[in-house]
Amino acid sequence: MNKTLTIVLIILALALIVYNVTIVDFNDPLGEQSIIAVIGIVASLCAIILLLILLTSKKIQEKVED
């Protein structure tokens, strides 16, 4: 996977987090409508963590090959 593509995916995940934060009702964050947005936020955070792990592993792989 290309580094540029990974960065674009991270930016898209951040955009999804921002969008879902606007949907969450902070008075009842686990309510019927807000729970979907909370799940979306958690899923986007997981995606960002996985992409950062991928970037780190690619850097390590490049150093090992040199």
Image: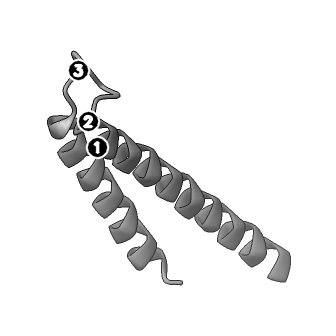
11 or 20: which is nearer to us? 20
Please determine whether, in this image, residue 14 is positioned above or below residue 35: below
Q: Looking at this rendering, what residue extends furthest in the left direction? A: 22
The residue that label 3 is drawn on is 26
Say which quarter of the image contains residue 18: top left
Kindly identify which numbered label has been placed on residue 34: 2
Q: Which residue is drawn at the image coordinates 49% and 83% (left, top)?
A: 2
Instruction: Quote the CA–CA distance across marks 1 and 3.
Output: 11 Å
Please determine whether, in this image, residue 9 is positioned above or below residue 44: below
Name the amino acid, label 3. Answer: Phe
30 or 47: which is nearer to us? 30
Instruction: Quote the CA–CA distance across marks 2 and 1.
Output: 5 Å
Q: Pick whichever of labels 1 and 3 is earlier in the sequence.
A: 3
Residue 21 visible in rendering: yes
| Quadrant that contains the C terminus | bottom right
Residue count near mark 1 (Cα–Cα under 10 Å), binned few <14, some 14–19, many ≥20: many
Residue 66 visible in rendering: no
Q: Looking at this rendering, what residue extends furthest in the top direction? A: 27
Are the residues tagged 1 and 3 within 8 Å (C-beta)?
no
Under circle 3, the secondary element is: loop
Residue count near mark 3 (Cα–Cα under 10 Å), binned few <14, some 14–19, many ≥20: few
Name the amino acid, label 1. Answer: Ala
65 or 12: which is nearer to us? 12
In the rendered image, residue 25, in percent from the top left (x then y), is placed at 19, 26
In the rendered image, residue 30, in percent from the top left (x then y), is placed at 35, 28
Name the amino acid, label 2. Answer: Ser
Are the residues tagged 3 and 2 within 8 Å (C-beta)?
no
Judge left or right: residue 16 versus residue 50.
left
Are the residues tagged 2 and 1 within 8 Å (C-beta)?
yes
Please determine whether, in this image, residue 50 is positioned above or below residue 33: below
